[in-house]
Amino acid sequence: MRSQVVIIGGGPSGLLLGQLLHRKGIDAVVLERKTRDYVLGRIRAGVLETGLVTLMREAGVADRMDAESIVHDGTVIAYGEDQFRVDFVETTGESVVVYGQTELTRDLYDAREACGAKTLFEVDNVVINGADSDAPYVTFTHEGSEKRIDCDFIAGCDGFHGVSRQTIPLTVRTEYEKVYPFGWLGLLSDTPPVHEELIYSNSERGFALCSQRSWTRSRYYIQCSLSDHAEDWSDQMFWDELRRRLPAETAAKLVTGPSIEKSIAPLRSFVTEPMRWGRLFLCGDAAHIVPPTGAKGLNTAASDIHYLYHGLMQFYEEKDSEGIDRYSEKALARIWKAERFSWNTTMMLHRFPDMNGFDLKMQRADLEFLRDNADAQRVFATNYVGLPF
Ligand code: RFL
Ligand code: PHB
């Protein structure tokens, strides 16, 4: 079998690239290790930057997103009983939208099926061959037999635990990592959000985030210990702890209900360089991870897809390899800035186990500077709404 592009991983990165290429007549097969239902069962991102929204429109899959997403013009930052708002529109002229990664992924799968693009689910033993040659191919097991696809290019969109990054020899690859000493326990419930905008809260009991998926569905997170297990947290324990981490006025308004999903995510900053090896290109979580505090993970994946898609089109339509040759450099330049923002926001809003009195004063000074300084708010908002591609 032959395909111009093989995309490893059917998460949002792989599906978005597949759809953009399909619209331009480039054939790209997607290989996904899990089932569609499994991928759609993972509750993840909720905040989309304009760059990602624009790409979804370019891919022709934005109708439901445009109808159902909620525009957010600002966010609330709370610390103890104090809180303030950062207005994105006033400071940057831009906003973000709230639309679940699950819904975005579903729209991409539906579009893929509707146009007859090929996705192979439950593939196993994916091996990338000849990535540094002019004749790369991918082998894998599917429905009990060994398969091979020859191609021009391979997009490694297989997330943090995928095979693509590992294919790049250690002599070529450098990894940068910071692991944080806590996780986020998330809860999804069919209850109205406590506030119309997101609330990021730094409390003495640890971080909390009030987010949402719609007017009737809420997503809440609390900072937890890495040794915690989601099943040990009853819904009641979660709601009680969340209330303690919010200003009293907000806590009093919280509407609780049974959880639909509860899970713990560890927090990590990670970047691998370079993001290209020969004809293999890494995209999204396969190449970089941010702690979710800045809502940047899915959005950085989208900027990778933007650069790779345009590079591939320049190659196929103009026989010019400049775009793919500069892919890694362009993608990384933007990623490091998103890494800095996500790290910085994580440091400002969480309680670290080893914090002393001085560290707490520094955190408070950071928060109060942001509260009181219009330039600091503009810098925060510029990063939150997303840097240009
Ligand atoms: P994914 O979504 O991990 O998809 C990779 C896919 O590859 C498959 N796979 C393989 N397939 C074939 N062969 C193999 N060997 C394979 N190995 C793996 C996997 O099954 C999977 O389907 O990566 P992708 O597409 O790069 O997308 C990245 C995003 O999922 C991620 O960055 C975001 O979810 C991060 N994130 C957030 N990002 C935002 O922009 N805004 C947010 O508000 C936000 N909130 C979050 C988040 C991530 C979270 N968690 C759980 C880590 C909140 C949380 C709690
Ligand atoms: C979410 O809704 O899942 C979400 C929102 C904002 C973040 C992280 C996660 O910073």
Image: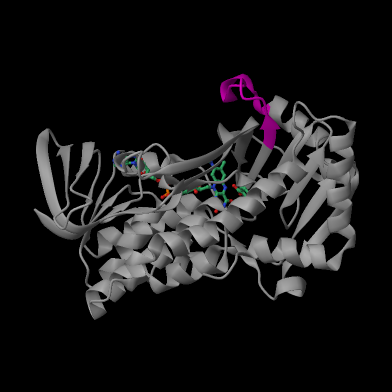
Residue nearer the viewer, 271 or 299: 271
Please give left or right for residue 20 compared with residue 64 in the image: left
Residue bounds of the magenta highlight: 222-235
Pinpoint residue 227: horizontal percent, then vertical percent.
61, 20
Pinpoint residue 222: horizontal percent, then vertical percent.
69, 35
Report which quarter residue 38 is drawn in: top left
Here the colouring is: one colour
Q: Residue at x 58, y 22 (%)?
A: 229
Report which quarter residue 159 is drawn in: top left
When the figure is inspected, residue 128 is found, relative to residue 301, above or below; the finding is above
When the figure is inspected, residue 95 is found, relative to residue 284, above or below; the finding is below
Residue 247, visible in the rendered structure: no
All told, the count of numbered labels is: 0
Please give left or right for residue 368 compared with residue 332 in the image: right
Q: Residue furthest bottom?
A: 318
Report which quarter residue 379 is drawn in: bottom right
Residue nearer the viewer, 322 or 297: 322
Residue 122, visible in the rendered structure: yes
Q: Can you tell me which quadrant of the image ligand 1 is in?
A: top left
When the figure is inspected, residue 379 is found, relative to residue 369, above or below; the finding is below
Residue nearer the viewer, 58 or 266: 266
Q: Residue at x 44, y 72 (%)?
A: 57
Please give left or right for residue 200 compared with residue 106 in the image: right
When the figure is inspected, residue 145 is found, relative to residue 225, above or below; the finding is below
Please give left or right for residue 146 compared with residue 192 in the image: left
Q: Would you say residue 336 sits in the magenta stretch?
A: no
Pinpoint residue 359: horizontal percent, then vertical percent.
84, 36
